[in-house]
Amino acid sequence: MLEQPTISPVIYLLISVISFPSVKVELENFIRNLSTISSELLAPPNCRWCICLKEEIRIGTTDALIIGDIQIDFLPGGALPVPGGDEVIPFLNDYIHLFALAKAKIFATRDWHPPNHVSFKPFGGPWPMHCLQDSEGAKFHPDLKLPKNVIVISKATDPGREAYSSFDGTPLADDLRASGITRVFVGGLATDYCVRWTVLDALSLSFSAVLLSDASRGINVEPDDSEKAV
């Protein structure tokens, strides 16, 4: 019987985005090698909602990976670029490989806006027009190695309603429950909006949720928005 893939405790922080300046860890290599650090890491005293995992995580068929909005418009050169958004793609590709090995479900969410969406500036919203349905900017970035059996979740399709969470107005919760999923791992763009609300909604819907801090970046309309989000 094959052993379930495991993940080092330093790679995952539950509902947190924090750094440990004194610990130099090549996260990407740790993911690839599935290594484990034996020394215990403690959360800094000013960390909010922060739990550092002290035991390795085993990924199985009751887990799911949710990849948020790795779309051309949210990456450098796009209509609404997240600073450093392209940096998460190699990490997400490693997670995709890991979850595929475990035969765990993989979901990819996308903004799928009609052209008259309420969130757009011409209609009184805060954002430039982005991720229009069937547009080039709404496509997933070609460097993201989504598997053939990925489940795509389209959100914010109602022109009169904003929807940051991957659960808002989508079949995601039903799909997870139908597949027996009890825990979700969430990464992508942007930490302070869609990733944050997806994690919070997952918890409110009684799923366990883990934020992939190395595979998430924030848009940071205000400089510390990503930190406040977690």
Image (spheres, rainbow, N blue to C red):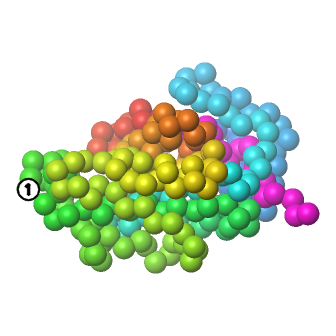
- Label 1 sits on what residue type? Pro
Is 93 drawn above or below residue 127 in the view shown? below
The residue that appears at 57% across and 40% down in the rendered structure is 207
Q: In what element is the residue under mark 1?
A: helix
Measured from the top left, where is residue 200 in percent x and y?
46, 37
Q: Nearer the viewer, residue 47 or 22?
A: 47
Q: Which residue is mark 1?
A: 122
Is 73 drawn above or below residue 18 in the view shown? below
Q: Nearer the viewer, residue 195 or 81?
A: 195
> Which span of residues is magenta-colored?
1-17
Q: Is residue 88 left or right of residue 131?
A: right
Measured from the top left, where is residue 131 in percent x and y?
28, 65
Q: Is residue 182 left or right of residue 154?
A: right
- Image quadrant in which the N terminus is located: bottom right
Q: Determine if residue 76 is in view.
A: no
* Residue 8 is covered by the magenta coloring: yes
Which of the 4 image quadrants contains residue 171?
Answer: bottom left
Measured from the top left, where is residue 116 in percent x and y?
13, 60
The residue that appears at 57% across and 49% down in the rendered structure is 177
How many numbered marks, from 0 up? Answer: 1
